[in-house]
Amino acid sequence: MALKLVLKPNERVIIGDCIVTNDDQRTALSIDGTIPILREKDVMAANKADSPAKRIYLAIQMMYLSRRPQDHHVFYFRLVREILSAAPSMRPYIERINNRILTGEMYKALRETRKLVAYERELLDHAIRQRSLRENRQRSI
């Protein structure tokens, strides 16, 4: 079954190891095959991978787009060990991601990793709120 990809004007998409840029009109493509495809909005630039979960996303993205995904496994597993030692509550997310990787479903692993990034954001927001509350209590004493 072909993938139907509708591109907005000037939208970019990675197809295999090529970057395709749409012109100034909406375009529909029908793509048959198993080559990796990643929309511009789903691409994590290295300079935007500014948190442990985002770096995991970047590692999986590199595996997904690579002809030799195993070249990125060492990087990925080092990041996983680091994030789990800092936040063991992330284990269920990592397990779901690992299951997708093991079954060769790299795009689905990327989707699972977006959930990890969102959970990381929740943890950080919670920590910031707690810190603010402590500081406010100390000021009132």
Image (cartoon, rainbow, N blue to C red):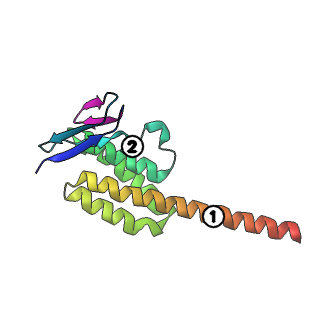
Which of the two residues, 59 or 10, is positioned nearer the viewer here? Answer: 10
Q: Which residue is drawn at 33% across and 65% down?
A: 95
Q: Name the residue under label 1.
A: 127
Q: Is mark 2 on a helix, strand or loop?
A: helix
- Residue depicted at 35% across the width and 49% down the height: 76
| Residue 91 in picture, x, y percent from top left | 40, 67
Q: Is residue 71 magenta?
A: no
Residue 23: which quarter of the image? top left
Tag 1 or tag 2, which sits nearer the N-term?
A: 2
Look at the image and give the residue range highlighted in magenta. Answer: 11-22
Q: Observer-nearest residue: 70 or 25?
A: 25
Q: Is residue 84 left or right of residue 132?
A: left
Whether residue 71 is visible to the viewer of this picture, yes or no, is: no
Q: Mark 2 points at which residue?
A: 41
Inter-mark Cα distance, 2 to 1:
28 Å
Q: Residue at image x 74%, y 68%? A: 133
Q: Residue furthest top?
A: 23
| Residue 16 belongs to magenta span | yes
Say whether marks 2 and 1 touch (CB < 8 Å). no
What amino acid is at disc 2? Lys
Secondary structure beneath label 1? helix
What residue is drawn where x is 18% and y is 47%?
3
The percent coordinates of residue 24 (x first, y second) are 34, 28
